[in-house]
Image (cartoon, coloured by chain):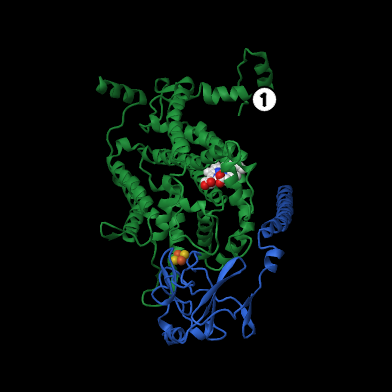
């Protein structure tokens, strides 16, 4: 980094710094003249948007932390104080709680974009894996953050999710006690969750750095899924994409502000305005919306795996659910090796495209199912059955459909170059 | 000959170096481990948390057929003074047909008193059925609304996703109307 040839800067101060530590050269190389495929669509905005949301979360979080008290007796009241008494406290908190939602919106779009256009395929496997790591860290951070206001959903969400680990044979119980620092979710738990909630976003920041580094080594994918071949295929990052990213970001922020200022509690759950009570479980525990699809997968497994007609059980329903839930994300890690089809973009893979769109619908359906009570019924069908069907499709997509399509799928003719594809598109428009 | 000696020496030197490297690495690993363990162990329950681990309960105000909830180690404990009918029901069940096979006798000190941890063994919700008027589930004990587990009058799991019976804490009768949990 920065050890190669360096061009002199006109500004003497910049030049003085840069000749000692070439940060300006680095910025210029990676964000100024950096060549980028010229055919990005708006789906390519969401990486930058996610980055802005990460910074928003860190900034609002640090200021909130100055007013927040991580103690079971005081946490709920300290958050209420932030809402009522601290100058602009309500705004900070709403920016932070809705910020988490919008961060996830951006990242989900970013991930599914990658799946649609085959961005996970070589040479970008590691870039993709780092992205999945970021997503896991985000889930951990958001889950822990939601515990901090110490409302009923905070407490019971924490209880149910930490109890997942008790499904592990033998080590399960000791692990749960260790996570809690006691015999139930209590003050030691809240205290350590706050410490971790402060730490993890900076870990995310570090992994984002690696993610972007890896991106700048192999370059961006693009909607055609073919590599740039000549200078005709690329434009410089600045000003073309600085402006396009800013434009998309503004739209995104307008939506975000609509929620922060006009529907700040729409995405939250009213029960979290009731202080945590270890003696009363809310009738219907739901996680935050961004966890719902995975929550539905967890609940879909209600059967155990063992030797039929005996009492021998290898995997209890509880453990099965936990394995399925974590497995659902773990599959993303190996996606580059499940889908070995040489063509990246779904534009040229009609079958993959169809199955992928079904997957997105399936994922949204899982989210809906996760939001409903376990015994709910829709159109006369028990939702638990639909949950199982949707879970089955989810796993089938990765474990069956991708490998089969890799071998069998016939593709449409690829364009010669990005430039040709852009020209062809412009021609068909005029 | 000279050649062989050099090769010998080299092999000799290499295995010596390997040995030193391996022992150094092993000691390093032990060193790191011995520092890491205290860090990990700080997160286990502290002494004051452990010190809170017994609770004494006065049973005298509880009427037959009534239940109360007390706190023990930050968890609810259900104490139910069972009616004759409830005791009978708990005893008459065919144990071999249960999800978690336990007879009523294994779960109690004195038939009239059932003491169980009020935490669903599925994912940790607090089942309802302790207060009068609450749903007691299909088996007259408790019902967990989170994912629908039914417990009987001995606190045993009878239906639903929970894998185990409600846990029975360690407790002893200090007198006829006083117990110590933990
Ligand atoms: C990856 C970035 C982050 C995510 C996804 C995230 C997520 C969350 C969530 C979902 C909540 C619960 C909001 C509510 O319902 O009230 C929360 C609360 C909180 N977070 Fe964060 N957070 C992030 C970064 C940070 C950082 C860097 C800090 C700085 C210490 C921080 C400090 C806090 C505090 C003090 C609270 C409790 C106050 C409140 O509930 O509003 N967060 N966080
Ligand atoms: S926690 Fe009780 S049924 Fe799931």
Q: Secondary structure at mark 1?
A: loop
Which residue is denoted by mark 1 in the rendering? A21
Which residue is at the front of the view, B56 or B7? Answer: B56
**Ligand 1 within 8 Å of the CB at mark 1:** no
Q: Where is A271 relative to A36, above or below? A: below
- The blue one among the chains is B
Residue A244 % position (x, y): 43, 25
Badge 1 crowding class, 10 Å Cα cut-off, few under 14, some 14 to 19, many 20 or more, is few
Compared across the picture, whether A283 is left or right of A89 comes to left
Q: Where is A217 relative to B43, above or below? A: above
Ligand 2 picture quarter = bottom left
Q: Where is A395 relative to B73, above or below? A: above
Compared across the picture, whether A305 is left or right of B123 comes to left
Residue drawn at 40 percent across, 81 percent down: B97
Residue A203 appears anywhere in the view: no
Instruction: Kindly indicate the quadrant of the structure image that contains residue A121.
Output: top left
Residue A377 % position (x, y): 31, 59
Q: Where is A140 relative to A221, above or below? A: below
Which residue is at the front of the view, A55 or B148? Answer: B148
Residue drawn at 62 percent across, 49 percent down: A194
Compared across the picture, whether A387 is left or right of A275 comes to left
Residue B153 % position (x, y): 46, 79
Residue drawn at 38 percent across, 29 percent down: A41
- Per the rendering, the colour in which chain A appears is green
Residue B3 % position (x, y): 71, 47
Which residue is at the front of the view, A233 or B172? Answer: B172
Residue furthest out toward the top: A10
Q: Output the chain of dot 1.
A: A
Residue A109 appears anywhere in the view: yes
Q: Quadrant of the C terminus of chain B?
A: bottom right
Report the label total: 1
């Amino acid at each position: 980094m920065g050890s190669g040839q360096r061009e002199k800067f006109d500004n003497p101060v910049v030049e003085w710094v840069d000749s000692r530590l070439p940060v300006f050269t680095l910025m210029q190389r990676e964000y100024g003249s950096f060549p980028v495929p010229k055919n990005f669509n708006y789906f390519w905005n969401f990486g930058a948007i996610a980055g802005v949301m990460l910074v928003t979360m860190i900034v609002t979080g640090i200021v909130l932390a100055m007013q927040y008290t991580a103690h079971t007796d005081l946490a709920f009241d300290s958050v209420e104080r932030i809402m009522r008494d601290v100058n602009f406290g309500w705004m900070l908190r709403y920016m932070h709680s809705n910020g988490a939602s919008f961060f996830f919106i951006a990242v989900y779009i970013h991930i599914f974009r990658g799946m649609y256009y085959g961005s996970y395929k070589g040479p970008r496997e590691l870039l993709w894996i780092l992205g999945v790591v970021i997503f896991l860290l985000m889930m951990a951070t958001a889950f822990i953050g939601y515990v901090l206001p110490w409302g009923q959903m905070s407490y019971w969400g924490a209880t149910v999710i930490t109890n997942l680990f008790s499904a592990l044979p033998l080590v399960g119980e000791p692990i749960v006690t260790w996570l809690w620092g006691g015999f139930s979710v209590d003050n030691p738990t809240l205290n350590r969750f706050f410490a971790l909630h402060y730490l993890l976003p900076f870990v995310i920041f570090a992994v984002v750095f690696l993610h972007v580094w890896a991106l700048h080594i192999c370059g961006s994918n693009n909607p055609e899924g073919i590599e740039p071949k000549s200078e005709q295929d690329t434009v410089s990052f600045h000003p073309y994409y600085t402006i396009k990213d800013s434009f998309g970001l503004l739209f995104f922020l307008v939506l975000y502000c609509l929620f922060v200022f006009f529907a700040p509690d729409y995405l939250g759950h009213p029960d979290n305005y009731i202080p945590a009570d270890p003696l009363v479980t809310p009738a219907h525990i739901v996680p935050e919306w961004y966890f719902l699809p995975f929550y539905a997968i967890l609940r879909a497994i209600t059967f155990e795996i063992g030797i039929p007609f005996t009492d021998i059980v290898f995997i209890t329903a509880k453990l099965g659910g936990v394995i399925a839930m974590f497995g659902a994300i773990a599959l993303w890690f190996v996606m580059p090796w499940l889908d070995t089809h040489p063509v990246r973009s779904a534009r040229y893979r009609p079958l993959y495209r169809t199955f992928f769109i079904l997957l997105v619908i399936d994922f949204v359906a899982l989210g809906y199912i996760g939001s409903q009570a376990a015994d709910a019924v829709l159109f006369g069908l028990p939702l638990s059955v639909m949950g199982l069907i949707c879970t089955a499709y989810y796993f089938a997509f990765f474990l069956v459909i991708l490998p089969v399509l890799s071998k069998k799928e016939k593709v449409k003719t690829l364009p010669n170059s990005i430039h040709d594809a852009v020209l062809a598109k412009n021609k068909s428009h005029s | 000959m000279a050649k062989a000696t050099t090769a010998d020496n080299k092999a000799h030197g290499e295995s010596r170096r390997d040995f030193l490297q391996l022992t150094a690495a092993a000691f390093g690993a032990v060193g790191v481990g011995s520092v890491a363990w205290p860090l990990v162990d700080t997160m286990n329950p502290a002494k004051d948390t452990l010190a809170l681990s017994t609770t004494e309960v006065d049973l005298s105000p509880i009427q037959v057929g009534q239940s109360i909830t007390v706190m023990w180690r930050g968890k609810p404990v259900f104490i139910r003074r069972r009616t004759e009918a409830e005791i009978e029901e708990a005893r008459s069940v065919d144990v071999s047909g249960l999800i978690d096979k336990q007879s009523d006798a294994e779960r109690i000190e004195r038939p009239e008193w059932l003491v169980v941890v009020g935490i669903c063994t599925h994912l940790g919700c607090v089942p309802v059925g302790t207060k009068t008027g609450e749903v007691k589930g299909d088996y007259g004990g408790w019902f967990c609304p989170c994912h629908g587990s039914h417990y009987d009058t001995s606190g045993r799991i009878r239906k639903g996703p929970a894998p185990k019976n409600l846990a029975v804490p360690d407790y002893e009768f200090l007198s006829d109307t006083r117990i110590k949990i933990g």
